[in-house]
Image: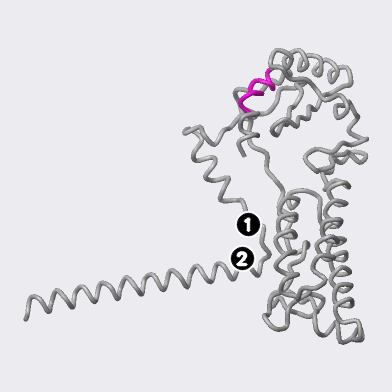
Amino acid sequence: MISPCLLNVALHGLEEAAGVRYQTSGKKAGDTMPGSPVVIRYADDVVVLCHSQEQAAQVKARLAEWLAPRGLAFNEDKTKIVHLSEGFDFLAFNVRRYQRKLLIKPSKAAIRRLRERLASEMRILRGSNAAAVIAVLTPVIRGWAAYYRTVVSSKVFHSLDTYVWRLTFKWARWRHRNKPRSWIVGRYFGTFNPFRNDRWVFGDRDGGAYLVKFSWTSIERHVPVKGAASPDDPALAAYWAERRKKVKPPLDGGTVRLLSALRQALRAIDQHVEDYITRVKFSRAFAEAHP
């Protein structure tokens, strides 16, 4: 985590160098002014959205001049000026305008890398049981789905669920070569998740654990941060607190309900323990006062 932090320090002021201007008053305070470019940056990955090809070339030249005294320069092999209708990849997302609609999706390269990783993991797990498969794949699926749950990922999630089903079915066929398909389906697939009416969930009959699906992660659109709002600004504490309240965990509804019920049960237990401790203290005090 230290590398992105240091790069944020080193590249502070890049927006101003690119010519980004924000509204400072009125209802649109924090929005970019008309004609201003927009800069999106994470560590050393930068995208600048411009209104024309000429403006893009001018911004690139200004940024190259601004980076030079800092001993930095653009990687020309990865830096290019493209029209939004052609699209571009940024942080494993693909940003592209389709006719009049802008869509952000998981990039094809990211999907290909995930498929290759899942296939590789399943080859390694050929000699393991279902519980090991679930333990290895679950964090991969949860993490990938959580990363892409804010964009247009529904179709990709369903296609990846189909891919994982094929991998697990192939794993089961390899593990039980002499068993018919009906036996394999009955042994490893079923309605393991009590909150989902889905009989094609991969699970472990012995322990009851099951493999989550990408499509169980709901799509939650990301709301951009206003202007230059910083979580370190004490004056914006209320804004960030309200923003965090609206962020839902990347879990399916059934898991959220279980966690909520568990939290209520723990609160009831805490209250019971406190009441018991109070009664014990009262009993001891009464015994000491009336020997």
Question: Residue 156 has which mark?
Answer: none
Q: Is residue 130 above or below residue 12?
A: below
Q: Is residue 251 above or below residue 112?
A: below
Q: Nearer the viewer, residue 138 or 234?
A: 138
Q: Is residue 241 left or right of residue 66?
A: left
Answer few, some or many: residues within 10 Å of disc 2's Cα (few below 14, many 20 plus, some between 14 and 19).
Answer: some
Q: Of residues 91 and 275, which is closer to you in this image?
A: 91
Which quadrant is the N terminus positioned in? top right
Q: Which residue type does callout 2 highlight?
A: Val
Q: Quadrant of the C terminus?
A: bottom left
Say whether residue 281 is magenta: no
Q: Position of residue 179 (x, y in %)?
A: 90, 86
- Which quadrant would residue 274 be assigned to in this image? bottom left
| Image spot of residue 161 (x, y percent) | 83, 64
Residue 121 placement, left or right of 227: right
Residue 124 in picture, x, y percent from top left = 81, 65
The quadrant in which residue 102 appears is top right
Numbered circle sitting on residue 249: 1
Asked whether disc 2 touches disc 1, contact meaning CB atoms under 8 Å apart, the reply is yes
Name the amino acid type tagged 1: Pro
User: Any mark on residue 256, and which?
Assistant: 2
Residue 9 lies within the magenta run: yes
Considering only order in the chain, which callout, 1 or 2, is on the residue closer to the N terminus?
1
Examine the residues drawn in magenta and state their main secondary structure.
Answer: helix
User: Residue 254 at x, y = what percent?
Assistant: 65, 70
Q: CA distance from mark 2 to mark 1?
A: 8 Å
The residue nearer to you, when weighing 103 against 212, is 212
Q: Residue at x 21, y 73 (%)?
A: 281
Which colour assignment does the render follow?
Answer: one colour
Q: Which residues are magenta?
A: 8-16
Q: Is residue 51 left or right of residue 206?
A: right
Rendering quarter of residue 60: top right
